[in-house]
Amino acid sequence: MDALMLSFSGGFMMRRQLRRRASLAVVMAVVIGLLLASGARYGPEQSQPAVKETATAVIDSGDVDGPHAPVDRVPAHTTVELSDGAVVRDFDLGDVELGPQSNPGAFRAPVRGVLVTPDTEAQSAPLVIFSHLRTFGCADDTFGYPCARGVEEIRADRGMTYFGKALAAQGYAVLIPDLSPLWSGAELSAPYDQVAGWLATVGRMREEAIAASAGRDSVLGEGLTGAVDASRTALIMHSRSAGIANAAVESWRESASPITSLMSYGGDYGVPDGPEADFAAPAPAYVPLLAVDGDADRDVKQAGPMWLAEHIGQPRSAPAISVRLPGYGHNYINRALSERGFDDRVLDEGMEAPKAADHERMLTDVAVQWLAQTVRGETGAIPTSSMAELPEQLVGIPARWLIAPGVERVSWTASGDAADAPALTALNGGSVTTCRTYADMDPNQYSDRCPYPEVGVLSSRSFTAAVTLTDGGGGHLDTDAHDVQSLAVHLAPTGDRADGLTHTPLRVVVTAADGSRYVLEPSGRLEALRNLARVDANGDYTLATIRFVLPEEAASTHVVGVDLTGGPAGGNISVRGVDLVTAGR
């Protein structure tokens, strides 16, 4: 976990915040250099006879600089277990040298994990890779590999075996690498490159699974011939693992196993804490992405929707979707954490909240639905189409959506550059101020800082247009969009309402080139405008999407203006962007 908050039985908490992110270009340059110049190398040979695993080195407790697998470590034998209708292989392929390039053997990590396949005669199960979070690898709550003498090792990969079995029951082959040794260093990029290490580690496992499926001799054992279809690989990431998505997609793009679907849970995408706009790079535009976040996450908090909001105007051929689910935290999808009571959430005594089993069920159900739609091409409830209604719930849980569609569209996004045009302007007594939201804990009064909401919190780091809505007044956008099929607004209420209304009233009117005006009806519920205040807590708002459909008589019209106005009760909204979809699907 990049930002680790673990609650111990005595109430002690430790928090580690790491927010450094490299651009994709820099990452890929380092990756290629390491992989080609022997910064990441394998050993011992995978065909070596395996005996009991040994770990002779002793490290001090506390934080460490990275993994130091003993050079005499002998890989453990592969074990095979039939469990819950799945075949579970626990394997060890030796070690990988992680570099740095000047000293390739300075850091070494084991290449091991779990492969779960269906216990059926079915062939060609699509490959799903689950990449877990950064967490303690040792039972004394320390990082590093190997653990201190006499201290039990904690395997976060095995904590996700339940997930692998659940997906295997749906016909998938699930590879779960053990990444705790690789992630033991605090930083992604130094003193060794963890992205390059991930590509080397997981790439080696992927090659072994492909070889076994092709009928070649493999450490994974017999019974895998024809079992795995890596030509449509999906990658599911937890926490820190989100930082390797772009490099993995680009590195494997021309291979026999390209990544065709991305999903994250509690992804640490990297959002700025200060004035620099150092967001993590946008996701690859040609691969569909679903970023799932629990709104009770106290580790990465709402990094997913904040990061996607910054890139909401990115031209895409596949959708990038953020969904926020109430009550769910960061850690309890992994049994290695839930069985030790490591709950990142802050829960009052007696508070009803999703338990570990609820987290597991949620993650499994969402993944099954997402994979069915993006890997198998089936229809489903997740709104991957730009014309789909935004459902009120996802797998029975209230859902708040933010979506960058994968279609042609004319987009406006709020910007701090006054030269950017067009701009949202005040209309009929409303007001519009372009400003940026900063971290609440940052006390600096930046010149472009948005005013604090009177009550409630807006979790954003991007520029927005802060609009005061009145009865018939608000903001106006000049545009020039032909053949418009639908419209989406990405926004949030600017804090809680004090008048008891459940939603902030919003009226959207488009003006056609011939002067006709059309009032748009929302497609689905107005969850993005819901007042999130509770009796015991202020609302915590993230930017979300509302979709509108054009009336039948206005379908495929030429739109030159968009008005956002309020009702008699008024209100305040923060608008990140507006999309006019010109090629709906």
Image (tube, rainbow, N blue to C red):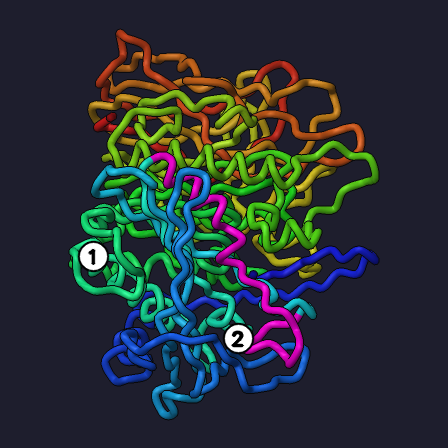
Residue 370 position, x and y percent, is 37, 35
**Residue displayed at 45% across by 31% down:** 545
Residue 459 disc label: none
**Residue displayed at 36% across by 19% down:** 510
Which span is picked out in magenta?
Answer: 142-170
Q: Cα distance, mark 1 to mark 2? A: 28 Å
Does 146 appear in magenta? yes
**Relative to 243, residue 395 above or below:** above
Corner quadrant of residue 336? bottom right
Residue 146 position, x and y percent, is 55, 78
- Cβ–Cβ under 8 Å for marks 1 and 2: no
Residue 135 position, x and y percent, is 58, 63
Q: Quadrant of the C terminus?
A: top left
**Residue displayed at 20% across by 57% down:** 253
User: 10 Å neighbourhood of mark 1: few (<14), some, or many (≥20)?
Assistant: few
Could you tell me the amino acid type at mark 1?
Arg
Q: Is residue 425 visible?
A: no
Residue sticking out furthest to the top: 553
Could you tell me the amino acid type at mark 2?
Gly
Residue identified by numbered label 1: 253
Name the element at disc 2: loop
Of 458 and 199, nearer the camera is: 199
Q: Quadrant of the N terminus?
A: bottom right
Corner quadrant of residue 4? bottom right
Name the element at disc 1: loop
Does 580 appear in magenta? no
**Relative to 403, residue 286 above or below:** below
Lateral position of residue 231 relative to residue 366, left or right: left
Of callouts 1 and 2, which one flags the residue occurring earlier in the amino acid sequence?
2
Residue identified by numbered label 2: 185
Of 93 and 582, nearer the camera is: 93
